Amino acid sequence: MLNLKLYDSDVRPDWCPGCGDFGVLAALKNALATLELPPDRVQISSGIGCSSNLPGYIKTYGHHGLHGRPLPIAIGIKIANPNLVVIVTAGDGDEYGIGFNHVVHAARRNHDVKLIVMNNEIYGLTTGQLSPTSKSGQRTKTSPDGSIIYPLNPLSTLLGAGATFIARGFSGDPKQLSMLIQEAIKHRGFALVDAISPCVTWHDIYDEVRRKMYKLEDVKHDPSDAVAAYHRMNESEKIGLGIYYRTEERPSFEELMHSEITSSIPAENVKNLTKDQIAQALAQFQ
Amino acid sequence: MQNEYNGNQDVTVRLGAAAGDGIQSAGEILMKIFSRSGLYVSTYNGNQSLIRGGHVWFHIHAGETRVYSLGYGIDHLVALTQLAYDEHFSSVNQGGAIIYDPSAVKQHDFPAGVKKIEAPLTKMALNHDKRPIMKNTVAIGLLGGLMGLDFGLIGRVIGEQFARKPDVQKSNVEAAKEGYEYAEQFGITKRLRYDYGTKRTFMHADYALALGAVAAGCRFYAAYPMSPASPIVHWMTANAKKFGIRVFLGEDEIAVVNSTIGASFAGARAMCATSGGGFSLMQEAIGQAAMTETPLVVVDVMRAGPSTGLPTKTSQGDLNMVLGISHDDFPRAIIAPKSPEDAFYTAGRAFNLAEKYQLPVIVLLDFAIGDGGYATVENLNFDFAIERGKIVREATQDMHNGVWFRRYMLTEDGVSPRALPGTPGLMYVAKTDEHDEWGHDLSDVLAGLKEAVNMREKQHEKRMRKMEYLAKEMRLPEVFGPEKADLTLVSWGSSALPIREALPKLWDKGLRVNSLEFTDVYPLRADVRSLLMEAHDLMDIEVNYTAQFAKLLRREFGVFIEKSYLKYDGEPIYPAEVVKHVEDTLQGKEVKQLA
């Protein structure tokens, strides 16, 4: 295990005291240190929102980009330089709302990118509006009488989309969350870790989560059983924490691409063409 | 009819049919035959946004010396459908010929002075195989005969075209032979000086740009299919294994441009291309690249809009969009190559500028030279310099504050050293929020504090300062024609080509006209102003409604170009239109006032 201090930033998080994101940050640092991944080998992309400020609070390479777009940024990075461990950290607005299209397709294509969604069921930084995972009946600034909208279930939706690793953790249990992140990083391909990360200011669900939560491993859930996973993902009165689904039967996008195209990776192959390649190219146009 | 050779000559051929008749393939075969006969070509693909039916045509201008545009009128029209005859017969030149199959086409109002060549194309095709589509190949053979081309070459090119379909290869060559022999009874309609020892290379600008990009080290390409930019992704995927190109097919243009930015951030030379609609979706991310100072090359192959507009028709209407991409001010470069050859070199320049100045470079092509038009390219130089700008490969003490790399260091030229992820000791966060030199956000806990206000101003100025240095690297327009002229035509991008073909006609008429061919559209060099001021009189020629480039010149230099020829019907500018408009204007017949 590497020293956790290796990842220390010089910035204190601007999150509210008690914010779930502190637990996610701690779990992520712990996971990287445990896996002995030095800061220069790790690339974390984020979007916009409280949780997306995370890359500034952990010393690795980072890309703090547009709202909803950290996944395609990460995919480009991973294709260009597969030697990097590429992680996305963002909120439910970013990943389950504006950028969900990218999540579905990243899962389907099985990009070797790890997606950690800090899910608080609310838009926090914009001061408390309905998010895609807000529950029916939830009162927010944009649903003063309680939401009439059915929430998105990201886990079962991604199971349907062909995701190969789906887990859920809780910021209140950073130890388990760290383990889930480690498993996600070790997984060959796309991994979703939905991290329940309560917003103490706009939608405090600590008590609710603690009341409903249980560990999937305690009930001997088999992560290779997609049907069982589907049922557990759709429990409304209980919240299972752990790995819901995992399969390594499908190779990752990058494995497939790099086995087809064997020349050096794009980040290292910024070169003119060889004489032979030029001749091959021109022959197509004569 | 010209049976004897008499000096430098050119020829225009138009093949007209329905979509699905294989007219594009036939046009490409003919273009290949011309190119292997030592001729120069320039073509236009009059296609429609459908797969079957409708009306499509393929126009070829070929010449013994360099041809730039589509020539004048039609010397040989091959009309495979009634619509093809109806649409094009009136454009056939005196001394030209119309080739048609009377079983499919009823001729009417046959133009005087044009040779009528009735040929049972379908019947001849069916003599060789039960494939009426081979009427194309018969027509190619027939044209070859009329133009006195060597059948050995014609057969070879057709054979190559069908190399992957051996079952129809032989029958196609035989069908062409029958067409060739059928032509004998009509004699030679037009014979050029053929040089079978010279193989000329042809590309359209989409292909040329793709090739230029890869030759400049681009190994990451992302796309979502959109006409007329799709040939770029077709070429990249077809050549991916050969050249080590990783192609990413995004779920939308937003994923496409962001993945391109990601790849570039990681150190690859990465590019993506689209047309106007896709570009509209990409805009927010282009602003992001400018803010994070990530090099980015984006290509917009313009088609007629707005909105989905005319997918297979041309326009130069996206200039205002790329001048005003996304919100607030940020530095950018805009280059609009005028020809496929120019597009090849532009790709390499775009990467060099993007990396040296760490900003977005937009390359504007259009359908007329993109998917729509092949042209001869000559003597391509593949050894151009790859200039990657300030990339730091090793950390030293002064580069970081103990935690973060000083990625956004304030510098004289506005460009800060960049480190690629994976480099030990130079970690940083690329920031789309306003930030200080070490990439700390100025957007949250510091926002509005004196120090942050001051740093915001400095960072914004630093980014914008790149434009001053970039402008010095931009090129002046090429002057085509005499240095002094009574009228100077101003164009940008591909509009230079029909003007090049129009000017000699105007000179023949004793008119002193020249042309300024802008390719480096933004930022403009300061000395462009004097070029414009020194001109005796100016006329703006471009393919959009509002004279977008002329308005840019007015905005940048206060120069108001009163005369203009603006086209926005979806078709490319033809040289004859330039000739007529310049003549009319100089004779005072028509002066279009700009709003």
Image (tube, grey):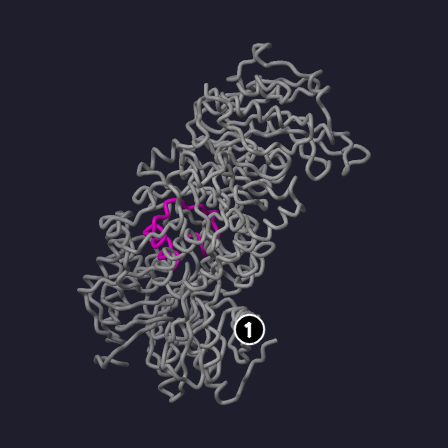
Q: Residues within 10 Å of mark 1 (few under 14, many from 20)?
A: some
Please determine whether, in this image, residue A172 is positioned above or below residue B594: above
- Quadrant assignment, res B494: bottom left
Residue A145: x %, y % from top left? 82, 34
Please determine whether, in this image, residue B224 is positioned above or below residue A153: below
- Quadrant assignment, res B96: bottom left
Q: Is residue B215 magenta?
A: yes
Quadrant location, the C terminus of chain A? bottom left
Using residue A134 as the reference point, say whether residue A221 is left or right of it.
left
Residue B289: x %, y % from top left? 51, 48
Figure label count: 1
Circle 1 SS class: helix
Q: Is residue B283 magenta?
A: no
Using residue B221 as the reference point, say whether residue A199 is left or right of it.
right
Please determine whether, in this image, residue B375 is positioned above or below residue A98: below
- Is B71 or B472 nearer to us in this picture? B472
Residue A11: x %, y % from top left? 58, 34
Is residue A14 in view? Answer: yes
Q: Which residues are magenta?
A: B205-231
Give the residue displayed 32% in from the left and 38% down from the top: A264
Give the residue displayed 41% in from the left and 73% down from the top: B498
The extreme front residue here reads B398
Is residue B52 in view? Answer: no
Residue position marked by numbered label 1 in the rendering = B554
Residue B553: x %, y % from top left? 52, 71
Give the residue displayed 48% in from the left and 20% down from the top: A34
- Is A239 or B524 nearer to us in this picture? B524
The amino acid pointed to by label 1 is Arg
- Is A90 or A282 nearer to us in this picture? A90
The extreme right residue here reads A145
